[in-house]
Image (spheres, rainbow, N blue to C red):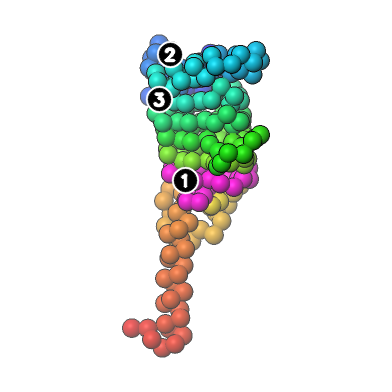
Amino acid sequence: MWRTIKTVYERDPAARNILEILFAYPGIHALFFHRIAHFLHARLHIPVIPRLISQFSRFVTGIEIHPGAKIGKGFFIDHGMGVVIGETAIIEDDVTLYQGVTIGGTGHEKGKRHPTLKRGVVVGTGAKILGNITIGENVKVGAGSVVVASVPDNSTVVGVPAKVVNQNGQKIHVKLLDHADLIDPLMEKIKELEERIIDLEKNTGRSK
């Protein structure tokens, strides 16, 4: 519990004191309920009750975490309303999620069907990470992105579907529209097409 409280202090500048964190942070409450549900589900193999605990937690906090999900230390859900974490998801230490994030599956397949988030991942508001993929260490996922493929360590991904726009501190195919280092790949492609059309018009003598 102390590790969790320390994590909130480190990542949320609005956190003022321990009592506020304990009683006013739904992410803390959801994680507390999940630890109980996961123990009953994974260690004791008790049926039904873990899911009931999960549903109660969802009702109270607005955060749904399946009892089967494996969550490491230093996990922080900021605000949290609408967060969904699937049954076979694996979340390693020091991961941060913002509201509306989905760590989900893509179908009815059996076995491992949800993402693995490695140490230090930060997932922005409303992002969706889907399928049995791996999000590497220290990856940043831009708000509203949809990630359906694995992402290498130390990268930033944005867009629908998400594309890597920064890796190991180096921008990748980034020429225009610098929005705080989170570039929209779709807008980049549109701009590239516009430039291509201008070049073609110049080459054919049709430029106005």
From what the image shows, is residue 154 above or below residue 18?
below
Looking at the rendered image, the quarter that the C terminus falls into is bottom left
Q: Amino acid at mark 2?
A: Leu
Are circles 1 and 2 on residues that touch, CB within 8 Å?
Answer: no
Asked which secondary structure carries label 1, the reply is: loop
Counting residues from the start of the chain, the first of labels 3 and 1 encountered is 3
Instruction: Report x, y in % for residue 40.
Output: 60, 14
Q: Residue furthest left?
A: 208
Q: Amino acid at mark 1?
A: Ser
Q: Image point 51% across, 25% down: which residue?
A: 65
Give the CA distance from mark 3 to mark 1: 21 Å
Residue that carries the numbered disc 3 in the rendered image? 62
Which label is found at residue 93? none
Of residues 67 and 139, the one drawn nearer to the viewer in this rendering: 67
Are circles 3 and 1 on residues that touch, CB within 8 Å?
Answer: no
Q: Nearer the viewer, mark 1 or mark 2?
A: 1
Which label is found at residue 145? 1
Residue that carries the numbered disc 2 in the rendered image? 22
Give the CA distance from mark 1 to mark 2: 31 Å
Q: Which residues, given as a range, are shown in magenta?
A: 139-162
How many other residues sit within 10 Å of disc 1, few (<14), some (14-19) or many (≥20)?
A: many
State yes or no: residue 132 in magenta. no
How many other residues sit within 10 Å of disc 3, few (<14), some (14-19) or many (≥20)?
A: many
